[in-house]
Amino acid sequence: MPKIPATIVTGFLGAGKTTLIRHLLTHAGGRRIALVINEFGDLGVDGGILKGCGIENCTDDDVVELSNGCICCTVADDFVPTMQALLARDVPPDHIVIETSGLALPQPLVRAFAWPDLKTRLTVDGVVTVLDGPAVAAGTFAADVAAVDRQRAADDGLDHETPLSELYADQVACADMIVVNKTDLMDDPEPLIARLRAEARPGVQVVPATMGALPVEVLLGRGQEAEGDLAARHEIHHHHHHDDAEDDHHDHEHEHGHDAFESFTVTIPEVSDPAAFATRVSDVIREHGILRLKGFASVAGRPMRLTVQAVGPRVDHYFDRPLGTDPRGAQLVVIGQAGLDREAIAAALS
């Protein structure tokens, strides 16, 4: 059976994780998404925000709360049994979204997906680190440091004390995508975005957001298989950390967040060399800062359809079925931040 993808959403208290997830659910397009929310003590509000939200395909049964402490310290006791229960459902979810406690290290959680009971059924589709843009730019990393300290003190099971700056570095090191949230509160987010691109691993995407409003296609379906790539996600610190809950009390939708992104279709002639074409696609993605690219193509002299899937500069391509009556040529959907040079991208892909 195909593995069920899981997206790990991490970031400090108040960065906007819950708001991003709620926006994701609202625009899930019929996907059955299960949520695992890491809350503990009496400070957690994320599950309450998401339960009873009235969003289609998001019932109370689809929101599972872990309230026995930071998720990275309770993997065996809480997390693994929860995932086993989700897998045992008569109708398993299409996708699992895990919101970590704000002080949890993401890497131990990614490592849990290699457990024997999970590795054949689940895969980490991607790690999304949500940052409070103004706070990171100011060097405080969290908007309310005192609230973070209260969260830390509330967790009796906390077995690690790490400065916020070090935990921030861990979250950045493990990320497949870094979301710089609250950019509407910044005069110019570009210097911070440029700095984060330099700090992160090669190929990690850094995108701005307001109220966590990102297209579903940008967040899900990344296919990173992070559990098999732990060496690259260097865990800078081997202590642990905790916090939880979001300070996002915004129930209103911010559809304008989608205005910051665009998608369009490029139609080009058929491909002569699939490998060379994949290299060209990767080069175009790097040059133009494209977030996602996907589509189908015919290959000269071949009767099979070529599927192309790209997340950042990583391009997967494979033959999936006979072309049949499909027209020869290629149609590729390009997704990125608003302002892409469509003519230049089409010309380069051709």
Image (cartoon, rainbow, N blue to C red):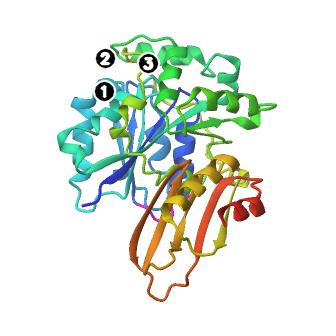
Q: Amino acid at mark 1?
A: Asn
Please report whichever mark, 1 or 3, sits nearer to the chain's N-terminal start: 1
Of residues 164 and 205, the one nearer the viewer is 205
Classed neighbour count for the residue bearing mark 3: other residues with Cα under 10 Å, few (<14), some (14–19), many (≥20): some
Q: Secondary structure at mark 2?
A: loop
Q: Residue at x 29, y 39 (%)?
A: 113
Query: If the image is split into quadrants, where does the N terminus sit?
Result: bottom left
The spot of residue 82 in percent (x, y) is 26, 41
**Dot 1 surroundings within 10 Å: few (below 14), some, or many (20 or more)?**
some
Q: In this rendering, would 83 be left or right of 168?
A: left
Q: Which residue is mark 2?
A: 157
Q: Is residue 125 left or right of residue 121?
A: right
Q: Amino acid at mark 2?
A: Gly
Q: Which residue is mark 3?
A: 236
Is residue 109 placed above or below 7 in the rendered structure? above
Mark 1 in CB contact with mark 3 (< 8 angstroms): no
Q: Name the residue furthest bottom.
A: 325
Q: Main secondary structure of the magenta part?
A: loop
Front: mark 3 or 2: 3
Residue sitting at x 52%, y 71%: 296
What residue is disc 1 on? Answer: 68
- Stretch of the chain drawn in magenta: 27-31
**Which amino acid type is marked by label 3?**
Ile
For the image, the number of numbered tags is 3
Above or below for 7 versus 132: below
At numbered mark 3, what does the secondary structure look like: helix, strand or loop? Answer: loop
The answer to whether residue 71 shows anywhere in this view is no
Residue at mark 1 to residue at mark 3: CA–CA distance: 25 Å
